[in-house]
Amino acid sequence: MAPLINILWLLPIQFSMLFVKVNGAKIPAIIVFGDSSVDAGNNNYITTVARSNFQPYGRDFNGGRPTGRFSNGKITSDFISEAFGLKNTIPAYLDPSYHISDFATGVTFASAATGYDNATSDVLSVIPLWKQLEYYKDYKKKLRAYLGDRRANDVISHALYMISVGTNDFLENYYAIPGRSSEYTVEEYENFLVGIAASFTEKLYELGARKISLGGLPPMGCMPLERTGNFMGGSECVESFNNLAADFNGRLNSLVIKQNNKFHGMQMVLSDPYGILLDIIRKPGDYGFEETGVACCATGMFEMGYACSRSNPFTCSDADKFVFWDSFHPTQKTCSIIAHYIVKHPLANFLSH
Ligand SMILES: *[C@@H]1O[C@H](CO)[C@@H](O)[C@H](O)[C@H]1NC(C)=O
């Protein structure tokens, strides 16, 4: 008798779990667009110098593998996927070792060094945002062939879409090379970028996306590269860049409100890393960090990509003590803290329904 009773007890639980699935309540996949903050190695398969598929990158990744993530290990989007009960890493769409069966629960089209602005992706010949959307259309066709129309449509309409881009438009483009800064005031440029974000999210909506996480900018004046350039200011964070990031995030937040009102069923949120990252930088000890101003890799002052070579004798031994891995990108540990903050706050509603 006892086993039968156990089975009867279990039945309602199984049915209720099934009910949740049928409702499509859970996030079935995470689909990512953006720059190095969320690129898992797409740039390995294009011709560009914006690369990181060599040591010491990835030295704390599964088996010490340099995948093309700009980190010593995993990146924020990987931790978010894990927190949603999906895969513990999100694979790069252009990586031929993955297939549609892998991409069905998560994929990234992101490309390091890209921006909202086509002129930003041109600087280092990386994948522009519009092209990432073309790859997404291609992905949708493959997903339909793999899962069938009904299940594929379910994934497409319930997936979480993440967009994480914008820092390079300012630091690699507007403030680094002539061109945009002679065409636009910084405020006009911000509005130009927000306009691109508006049309990008509208196109995503038309293609079936509903749950969208629009990424805010980090306090970009605190990146070691910018601090190194601020030698007149004692290598402190560059306030003007931080203020610009905060101002831009405010404009993105207005866009989120506007799009949610305009498009029926749209559930867009702003995933803003600014506050949490600034808190880490101001109170590193609270999070177990020891160094905020310079990065782990090489001298930590300006190196990233190829300059972060394996042979550099200055590279730190324990990246977990550092907020930044290279002069532009956070360590795996920082990414993990940001991801958990984002999941707990802006994305919290998507965890339950
Ligand atoms: C970027 O380039 C694509 C392809 O040429 C074009 O369709 C798009 O309008 C451009 N975006 C902007 C904002 O100029």
Image (spheres, rainbow, N blue to C red):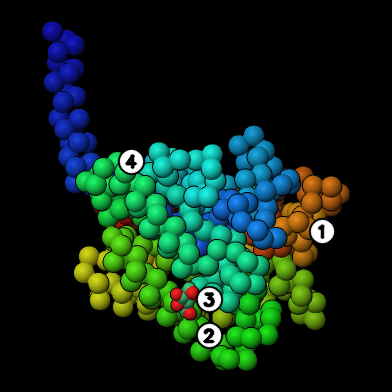
Q: Is mark 3 within 8 Å of ligand 1?
A: yes
Looking at marks 3 and 1 on the same chain, the residue that comes earlier in the sequence is marked by 3
- Lower sequence index among marks 1 and 4: 4
- Residue 103 in which image quadrant: top left
Residue that carries the numbered disc 4 in the rendered image: 146
Real-space Cα distance between discs 3 and 2? 10 Å
Between 87 and 116, the one lying in front of the other is 116
In this rendering, position of residue 222 left or right of residue 147: right
Tell me what residue is drawn at x 19 percent, y 31 percent: 13
From the top left corner, tell me how far across and down residue 21 is, in percent.
23, 41
Check disc 4: other Cα within 10 Å, few if <14, some if 14-19, many if 20+.
some
Three-letter code for the amino acid on which mark 2 is drawn: Tyr
For the residue pair 166 and 134, the one nearer the viewer reads as 134
Q: CA distance from mark 4 to mark 2?
A: 41 Å
Q: For mark 1, what is the residue?
A: 299
Location of residue 57 with respect to 208 vertically, above or below? above
Name the disc covering residue 189, or none. Answer: 2
Residue 133 in the image, given as x and y percentages of width and height: 42, 63
Q: Is mark 4 within 8 Å of ligand 1?
A: no
